[in-house]
Amino acid sequence: MAPWPEVEKPETNNYIGDSSKQNQNMTGKEGENHKAGNVASLGNKGEIQPAFSTIALIDETRPEEEDPWALPELQDTGVKWSELDRKGKIIRVLYGIGKFIMLLGLLYCFVCSLDILSSAFQLVGGKAAGDIFQDDSVLSNPVAGLVIGVLVTVMVQSSSTSSSIVVSMVSSTLLTVRSAIPIIMGANIGTSVTNTIVALMQAGDRNEFRRAFAGATIHDFFNWLAVFALLPIEVISGYLYHLTSVIVESFQLESGDDAPELLKVITDPFTKLIIELDKSVINAIATNDEAAKNKSLVKIWCVTETNVTLQNVTIPPSENCTSPDLCWTEGNTTWTMKNITETENISKCRHLFADADLPDLAIGLILLALSLLVLCSCLVMIVKLLNSVLKGQVASVIKKTINTDFPFPFTWLAGYLAMLAGAGMTFVVQSSSVFTSAITPLVGIGVISIERSYPLTLGANIGTTTTAILAALASPGSTLKYSLQIALCHFFFNVSGIILFYPLPCTRLPIRMSKTLGNVTAKYRWFAIFYLLVCFFLLPLFVFGLSLAGWAVLLGVCLPLSALFIAVIVINIMQSRRPHSLPEKLQNWDFLPIWLRSLEPWDNIIMASLAFCGKHCCGFCKCCKVNAEQEGANDKQLKTMEVYENTIAMADEDRGGRRAPAAACVEKTGTNNTAL
């Protein structure tokens, strides 16, 4: 028998010692190895070549993971302008004009649907919002006032409506200005729910949803952080109340004309064909008018005339006459003369529900469903239209205009100019909800960065307060002082928040918080709805319920929960930055049950529930099957791309089931770097 051929000791460092060197060696000699492949195989026929791990090659050749927050390049896949003939250029120009007109029409429908959505929420919860304001003992509690402002603004979808209710109550001496300030802070939080709802419409694409939801919730985080920082200062010192009192007292104020309504002039002709509301009913309920509880919010008569006449009326014998000369008796009946106010209905409204015999709740639910349908449809078409328009050179120009900073000494100036632009645009449309909802899709598709959307949102907060100040200056003389003072409180509250959370880059916490939430919601998209329900409904309702039980219960429950929440945040920060400063057990959360430290078990439960429901719904089941097939195809393609060099490893993987992460594979095979 022939002896075994001698095998030289392989130099393992050439294969596994320096991975970068190995990679260069392989790529540099690829052509040479290809040419001399047969010669090498014949020449080394008697040798056993040293094997190496394909896992290391997989890790080396795998492309680096892209930054999910980087703005995507919107490539222009069409024919270049210079390559078009005259007819093609004319057609492209006409297409561009048509797309621009369609975009304006969709934006108009989008804004109108937001207006109708607000009316629908007022029909559904407007009277309940008025009832909430009736409990004076609860409103004197600043924490309760804060959550009432959040709940009422979410229910009526308008901070202007909730602010007008507060002004009516203050002018009727049912509420003091100092007690009204926490309600205004809550209204500032509640108005940010609209663009958060709009961001949910971009959940189809994971990266778009990541950016859109972060761009929407940056408004939420700024408002919450400003409240947590400034509400205790206001309760202790009353600085907003005293500052605005000095400003109001220093001016000789007179009531003016109506405030300008720039956007309403365009949208009212259409929205008034759908629904018109009598918003004075909510104010009357809040000011304890019992007769208003039986009135409908739907306006039936749009043109009325009020007449005051002096008439003879009968009064009970027990009632004293205002003047003996104006009273007389005929038999057992006592007559007197009184001024009687009569309202004459002249012309009916022309909206769809003027003659409908439906309760307010039914009309509100119908409008809620229709407005959400139109809102979602318009938003989807706007995003698709923007994706088709903002390509190539157009996209690069817009991105450079919006996102580019100034040269070094004036880098800080770009953010403040964006803030000024946001304030100006909000003043034009007279609604921070409309402006922030309009820029949310632009953040989603990558035209506006998160860092630039932050000052735009802060500018929207300032712009909506300037609109409120103008509206206050147009108030009647009886409410002018209070409405102006409340509007100024709103203005200086937002300015104080900007001073705290914008000038220094390290203080821009809302950007980091919104990016963290965006990453979570991109992975677990159901968490976006959970966040919306908790922050704007469940948490305010929980705190409101505790406030009804009194200060002792409120502090006894909220203080330990707040301390626990702050402790978890501090420990998380130290775990990521200085883990060795913590006790060994607190350096990670592995000692907790997995359902307390990970969303994966909850995600499995929710996905299983949706799969169970999908069995009873053909469309959903079919959709899930298509998604599962696509994911399976992607996994199969990824598998063949990664391990095609090692057929035995591929067979082991098929037998072992699901592919383990690359890091785990490397760690597991660290002592055995050969593949037979």
Image (spheres, grey):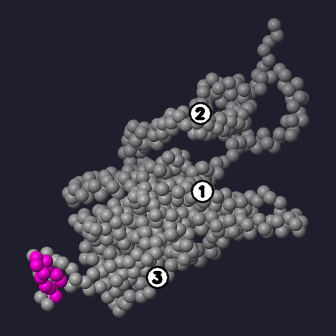
Looking at the image, which residue is at 31% across and 64% down? 294
Query: What residue is disc 3 on?
Result: 259
Q: Amino acid at mark 3?
A: Ala
Q: Which residue is mark 2?
A: 660
Upstream in the sequence, badge 1 or badge 3? Answer: 3
Compared with 81, 362 (above or below) is above
Q: Quadrant of the N terminus?
A: top right
On the image, the x and y values in percent for residue 539 come to 36, 54
Identity, as a three-letter code, of the amino acid under mark 1: Ser
**What residue is disc 1 on?**
377
* Label 1–label 3 contact, CB within 8 A: no
Bin the neighbour count of mark 2 within 10 Å (Cα to Cα): few under 14, some 14-19, many 20 and up: few
Is residue 510 toward the left or the right of residue 67 in the image?
Answer: left
Residues at marks 2 and 3 touching, judged by CB atoms closer than 8 Å:
no
Tell me, yes or no, whether the highlighted magenta stretch contains residue 319.
no
**Region of the chain picked out in magenta, as a range:** 326-336
Towards the viewer: 508 or 141: 141
Cα separation between marks 2 and 3: 64 Å
Mark 2 or mark 3: whose residue is earlier in sequence = 3
Is the C terminus in the top left, top right, bottom left or bottom right quadrant?
Answer: top right
Q: Residues within 10 Å of mark 1 (few under 14, many from 20)?
A: some
Q: Secondary structure at mark 2?
A: loop
The residue type indicated by label 2 comes to Ala
Residue 540 found in image quarter: bottom left
Q: Residues within 10 Å of mark 3 (few under 14, many from 20)?
A: some
Could you say where residue 592 lies in the image, as x and y percent from the top left?
38, 39
Name the disc covering residue 150, or none. Answer: none
Find numbered disc 1 in the image and state the secondary structure of the residue it sits on.
helix
Distance between the alpha carbons at the discs numbered 1 and 3: 32 Å
Left or right: where does residue 335 sit relative to residue 205? Answer: left
Is residue 561 shown left or right of residue 92? left
